[in-house]
Image (cartoon, rainbow, N blue to C red):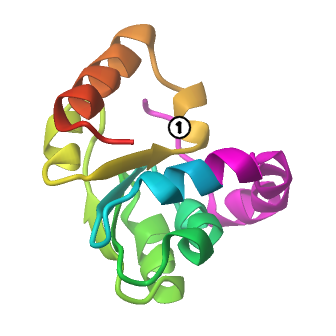
Amino acid sequence: MSASFTAEWLDLREPFDSAARSGELAREFAAALAEKAAIVDLGAGTGANLRALAPLTGRARRWRLIDADAALLARAANSSAGAETRVLDLARDLEVACEGADAIVANALLDLVSDSWLLRLVAIAAARRCP
């Protein structure tokens, strides 16, 4: 997972990601959350998942945005008041990134990972019973 993206490229991509999102799946995800759920966004970039899902998940949820790029996370923090940000290498620190998670989200990151990485994520999510 050595790919890096500029904030400008992510800005250009966001409307297309938004159009491709399943509203039904997003509502099901939000309904599955506990009242004070801690949501971890892997490969958060500038915070597009938070911006898309926050209206459905409510303000009582706690968000932790994880990315390897500190500049992207700084931008996410500026537009996502109250979200925790953490710079981590998800190839090496996936378990650390998911600690304390009640729910795990990822967007385009899943296009970039290996089968073995994805199986690690599924195992972590299953062990934590995360939606």
- Residue 87: say if magenta: no
Q: Quarter of the image holding residue 87?
A: bottom left
State the quadrant of the N terminus: top left
Residue 86 in view, yes or no: yes
Q: Is residue 9 above or below residue 92?
A: below
- Residue at 58% of width from left, 65% of height from top? 53
Along the horizontal axis of the image, is 68 left or right of 13?
Answer: left
Residue occupied by mark 1 = 109
Q: Which residues are magenta?
A: 1-26
Along the horizontal axis of the image, is 6 left or right of 101?
Answer: right
- Residue at 53% of width from left, 30% of height from top? 110
Task: Give the main secondary structure of the magenta stretch.
Answer: helix
Is 27 or 46 nearer to us in this picture? 27
Q: Residues within 10 Å of mark 1 (few under 14, many from 20)?
A: some
Q: Quarter of the image holding residue 86?
A: bottom left
Q: Secondary structure at mark 1?
A: helix
Along the horizontal axis of the image, is 19 left or right of 118?
Answer: right
Q: Position of residue 45 (x, y in %)?
A: 51, 59
Q: Amino acid at mark 1?
A: Leu
Residue 44 in view, yes or no: no
Q: Is residue 81 above or below residue 16?
A: below
- Residue at 61% of width from left, 77% of height from top? 55
